[in-house]
Image (cartoon, helix red, strand yellow):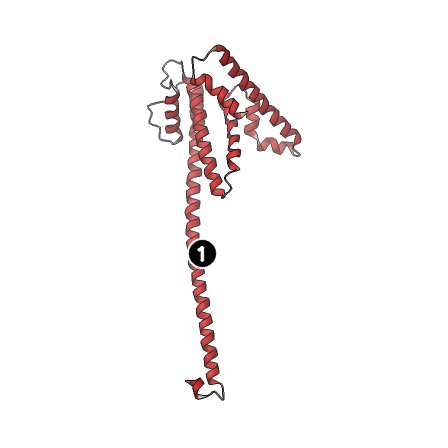
Amino acid sequence: MAVVFLVAYAWPILDPHLARPLVDGCRVATWVAWGAFALDYAVRLSLSQYRLRFVLGHLLDLAVVVLPVLRPLRLLRLVTLLAVLNRYARVSLRGRVAVYVVGSTALVILVAALAEVDAERGHAGAVIRTFGDAIWWAITTVTTVGYGDLYPVTLTGRLVAGGLMLAGIALLGIVTASLASWLIERVRQVGEESEAATHRDIAALTAEVARLRDEVTALRRPGAGPEQRD
């Protein structure tokens, strides 16, 4: 349903000259998908043992359901597609983080570009008129580069831009934290290997000293022959 919603939402935006019946069909598909999202939320809420905790833990899903007029916000429901990718990222926690970061970045850029060109197209003074312009704007914004060659002029477009800026900061923070975690783990592994090697060397030296002590004791034992002393 999320994929159907994405296609139905994006098609009229990418093709401004789409025939009216197809546009109406896409609009119906988006509302059907939204209805499925609302039904999914209602069922999960009814099955939850602690409903207040469920509501507080799924505020985004609640906003998607109760604010259907904000189409860009409803597009955030597509993040659930990352759960499918997560099934194949079983190697490590860092692998899952990488999957989420890459998938989230791609979805956020796509969603923001679609919402931005939908908000800006046809307005006086707008500089973001095509999907290509919107993609370039979304990439420069989410990476906090911000060349300033493309910028929103409408209120909706600026709201989308604000959300994209916050998402970019969050994604950069995740990437930085993951890199720092990897470096710390590598340093710890090197330290652990060095410490293990030192322990092995100490154990070997201790065993050698013990063996030599036993030999000296045996040589000093009364009745030891010259051969033993030699």
Q: Where residue 38 sits: x, y (%)? A: 59, 24
Q: How many marks?
A: 1
Q: Quadrant of residue 126?
A: top left
Extreme front residue here?
Answer: 227
Q: Is residue 170 visible?
A: no
Quarter of the figure with the N terminus = top right
The correct choice, above or below, for 88 with respect to 162 in the image is below
Left or right: residue 30 versus residue 106 is: right
The correct choice, above or below, for 148 with respect to 97 in the image is above
Q: Is residue 121 visible?
A: yes
The correct choice, above or below, for 84 with respect to 135 in the image is below
Residue found at x 51% / y 25%:
3
Please, what is the three-letter code of the amino acid marked with disc 1?
A: Glu
The correct choice, above or below, for 124 with respect to 54 in the image is above
Q: Where residue 74 sits: x, y (%)? A: 52, 24
Quarter of the figure with the C terminus = bottom left
Secondary element at image label 1:
helix
Q: Residues within 10 Å of mark 1 (few under 14, many from 20)?
A: few
Q: Where residue 68 sits: x, y (%)? A: 54, 20
Q: For mark 1, what is the residue? A: 192
Foreground: 4 or 31?
4
Extreme top residue here?
Answer: 20
Residue found at x 46% / y 32%:
104
Q: Where residue 40 sits: x, y (%)? A: 60, 27
